[in-house]
Image (cartoon, rainbow, N blue to C red):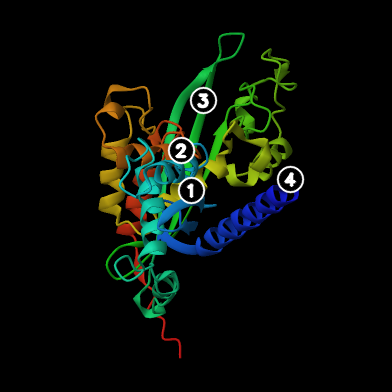
């Protein structure tokens, strides 16, 4: 009797395992891939589906803004898994990236209804510009400044700025390429270590000099022709100053200007000026996230500004340099390159 019972239990166990294995084999797991256009570029997803249930979503977008768009790459997939649907709430402040993840998942699940963007075609269009359609513009804007500040003897610091904007425009006036640089020169009583200096002209007798940059005047600069020439020989633009001109945790002056230049490519000068009017404060700096003006912007505008300010916060038009005006000047001075390249 015991042997029969033991044999019966063994048979039941075998049948149980067989049934389990048959169900496991029946559950098919599909691994699908999808793509979409994010805020910074291509967003891709890997979606795992088992019996019409979304069990896993992995999202990737290496060009999405760190700390702004990237949270959506983590949070939206989890929302989709929990809802077993792409009908989920988007992440505030990361609308572009959120929508990209949702679309990419839809593309993976239903590529006919949600076709993948043709990234190669977009790139080809960008590169297909004919040389004969290009216009070269150069803008130069100068401004003098009473300052910054005074030295420890009460003597005024004086400075001036020259902004250079070298821009290529297409036949519609859109910016194809832009390169901005600036020369800032101050009297030698300014304590900035890498600041180019001009003491004046030798017959004037030199100017207060903070030689060791400790905010205390050490004497006057030599009133000689040689020193006058050496000062000018040592002038460097802000790009040339490189790592000697770190403005903040965002990096150098050049790093910040690169961010603005990237933003303006594809815009007309009118659109650049419109952007400046809509998205900067009274000091010419991008609107801060804690300001009332920022709170009145929609999610897309806030995400755009968050992306910009992750790379640049310096003013685009104040006594430190009139960059917007230089871009306008470059457009007004543009000439048809009239290149016939065969």
User: Of label 3 and label 2, which has the lower sequence position?
Assistant: 2
Quadrant including the C terminus: bottom left
CA gap, disc 1 to disc 3? 42 Å
Residue 297, position as x, y percentages in the image: 26, 34
Dot label at residue 2: 4
Tell us which disc is closer to us: 3 or 2. 2
Dot label at residue 64: 1
Residue at the image position 31 percent from the left and 29 percent from the top: 294
Give the SS element for disc 2.
Answer: loop
Which residue lies under the disc numbered 2? 68
CA gap, disc 4 to disc 2? 69 Å
Residue at the image position 51 percent from the left and 30 percent from the top: 159
Give the SS element for disc 3.
Answer: strand
Tell us which disc is closer to us: 1 or 3. 1
Give the SS element for disc 4.
Answer: helix
Residue 32, position as x, y percentages in the image: 48, 64
Q: Is residue 5 above or below residue 42?
A: above
CA gap, disc 4 to disc 3? 107 Å
Residue at the image position 63 percent from the left and 32 percent from the top: 195
**85 or 220, which lies in front?**
85
């Amino acid at each position: 009797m015991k042997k029969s019972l033991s044999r019966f239990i063994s048979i039941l166990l075998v049948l149980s395992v067989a049934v389990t294995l048959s169900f496991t084999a029946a559950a098919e797991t599909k691994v699908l891939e999808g793509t979409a256009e994010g805020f910074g570029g291509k967003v891709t997803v890997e979606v795992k589906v088992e019996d019409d249930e979304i069990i896993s979503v992995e999202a990737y977008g290496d060009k999405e803004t760190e700390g702004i768009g990237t949270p959506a790459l983590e949070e939206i997939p989890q929302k989709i898994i929990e809802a077993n649907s792409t009908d989920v709430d988007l992440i505030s402040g990361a609308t572009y990236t959120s929508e990209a993840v949702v679309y990419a998942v839809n593309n993976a699940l239903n590529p006919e209804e949600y076709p993948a963007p043709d990234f190669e075609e977009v790139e080809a269009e960008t590169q297909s510009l004919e040389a004969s359609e290009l216009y070269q513009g150069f803008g130069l804007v100068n401004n003098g400044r009473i300052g910054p500040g005074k030295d420890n003897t009460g003597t005024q610091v004086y400075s001036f700025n020259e902004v250079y904007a070298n821009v290529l425009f297409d036949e519609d006036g859109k910016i194809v390429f832009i390169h901005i640089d600036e020369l800032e020169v101050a009297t030698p009583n300014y304590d900035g270590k890498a600041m180019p200096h001009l003491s004046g002209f030798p017959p004037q007798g030199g100017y207060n000099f903070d030689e060791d940059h400790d905010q205390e005047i050490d004497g006057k600069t030599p009133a000689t022709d040689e020193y006058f020439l050496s000062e000018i020989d040592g002038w460097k633009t802000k790009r040339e100053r490189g790592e000697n001109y770190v403005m903040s945790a965002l990096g150098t002056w050049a790093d910040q200007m690169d961010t603005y230049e990237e933003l303006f490519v594809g815009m007309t000068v009118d659109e650049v000026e419109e952007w400046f009017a809509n998205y900067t404060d009274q000091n010419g700096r991008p609107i801060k996230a804690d300001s009332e003006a920022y709170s009145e912007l929609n999610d897309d505008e806030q995400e755009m500004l968050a992306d910009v300010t992750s790379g640049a916060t310096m003013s685009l038009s104040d006594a430190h340099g009139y960059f917007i005006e230089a871009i306008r000047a470059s457009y007004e001075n543009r000439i048809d390159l009239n290149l016939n390249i065969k």
